[in-house]
Amino acid sequence: MAGLITMDDLTNEQIINILDDATRLLPVAKGELFLPLLQGRILGNLFFEPSTRTRMSFETAMKRLGGEVVNLGDIKNSSVVKGETLFDTIQMVDGYTDIIAMRHPRQGAAQYAQDSARVPIMNGGDGAGHHPTQTMLDLFTIRQAHGTLEGLKVVLAGDLRYGRTVHSLSHALTRFGCELIFVSPELLKMPPEIVSDLREHGATVVETEDLLGTINDADVVYMTRIQKERFADEDEYTRCAGAYRLHADNLGDVKSEMIIMHPLPRVDEIHASVDSTRHACYFNQAFNGVVARMALICYLLGVKVPINIKSEGGAL
Amino acid sequence: MANEHSMRRVTAIRNGTVIDHIPSGQALRVLEMLGISGKSSVPVSLVMNVPSKKMGAKDIIKVEDRELTQTELDRLALVAPDAHVAIIRAYSVAEKLTINLGTEVFNVVRCTFSNCITTNLREPLPHRLKVISRDPLHIRCHYCGRPQDLDELIKNVL
């Protein structure tokens, strides 16, 4: 059964349908209604790398819909440290579960797992590769704020080289005709093969190192953390750390409806002074991880989300 | 005429393999891909940049006392997908082999990206590269999606 490895696994129409399902599921995600659409189903959470939001939101999504979750747990206590291959781990979990959410430090691991499994794999991040479930919640958040995904001007700033969230998101935004402005230090530029892919698909891409010169025209400013754990060389990290810091004082001339997003965790890219502005959207974005993943799991398992949620759901 | 002229540059072989219509300048890459080095004891003749009606210029390799296997043909597909391969026995063409560069290359080379999941050689699934375009040759790993550089790929022949 097909899963979600990259955004290429979904058509624009499928993306919109999943976002529509997610919108209807909001009262369930908030705990206002109980709708056990996934009762009797089991999600396997396989996180070979640390994760807070992605792992917890998958778990919450499953439980809000009445499903169950089994976790790989700490990999230090799993068969992985004994040298078990990913193939063997997947064979085992495939037999225990109906769907798998996975994060792995190696690029291509999610596709490898999908080729080894019968159940759908949801890629929760593979090295510096893709993070399509994050993209689904990002698209949900952007559409929630702007009412559309079409033709927006989106600034993506920070670590564009290793940041898998921006890789998946820029592919998806290109398909909806958005204009992309990539802001990064030279060392952390978007990989050239991704930029050329985007341009081949008709994207308008601008690359710059100047963040403040781009934000006043933007509809979305998507900040990312400089990821220390992706650098082999500590000196290179030091040269890039703290390259971009957004402060409330920088927002005086931005569009009133502009939103600031961040996949979190943040370090110092967004100052706490931004949190209380109308532009701060990152905590709502993190919450949306639950509802977007609820809709995605239903879609991948072929479970129909009712049109009228309120008549189907029960009170808690 | 050009072909006759070029064939006079090397003598006919009694038994072995002739690889003709190699893109001009690619013969050394072909030898590397086939694992033929100066250390092997079989005689190898090589001509480069000879005139060709069809290609303008081409390279030719003749390997004596060795017949290419299907695995070797699959490797050849990456560097010379339109080459002609003939097996020679007793000075005559005994077989003409077809090189086929399809849409995927299975278990011929492994991905060159150091953080690809396939760098764990204990993982049992096949090494798979997707052919995005033939001319110019553009290949990506099926798993990690990274574009592959041919010079690096040659070092990763399985």
Image (cartoon, coloured by chain):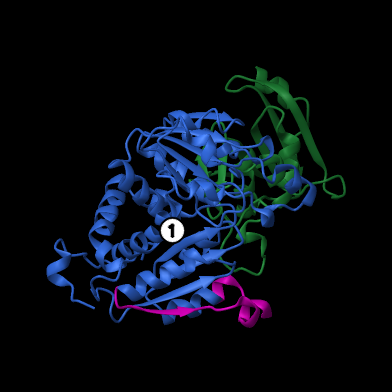
Query: Is A32 in front, or is A272?
Result: A272
Residue A294, horizontal then vertical, whole percent: 33, 65
Residue A120, horizontal then vertical, whole percent: 39, 67
Is residue A3 depicted above or below B25 in this figure? below
- For the point 79% across and 47% down, the residue is A235
Q: Is residue A289 left or right of residue A129?
A: left
Residue at which label 1 appears: A286
Is residue A144 depicted above or below A117 in this figure? above
Is residue A30 depicted above or below A277 in this figure? below
Q: Is residue A76 magenta?
A: yes
Query: Is A111 in front, or is A7?
Result: A7
Q: Which secondary structure, mark 1?
A: helix
Chain letter, green in picture:
B
- For the point 50% across and 40% down, the residue is B132
The quadrant the N terminus of chain B occupies is: top right
- For the point 72% across and 47% down, the residue is B34
Residue B106, horizontal then vertical, whole percent: 56, 55
Q: Is residue B17 left or right of residue A21?
A: right
Q: Quadrant of residue B56?
A: top right
- The magenta stretch is A65-88
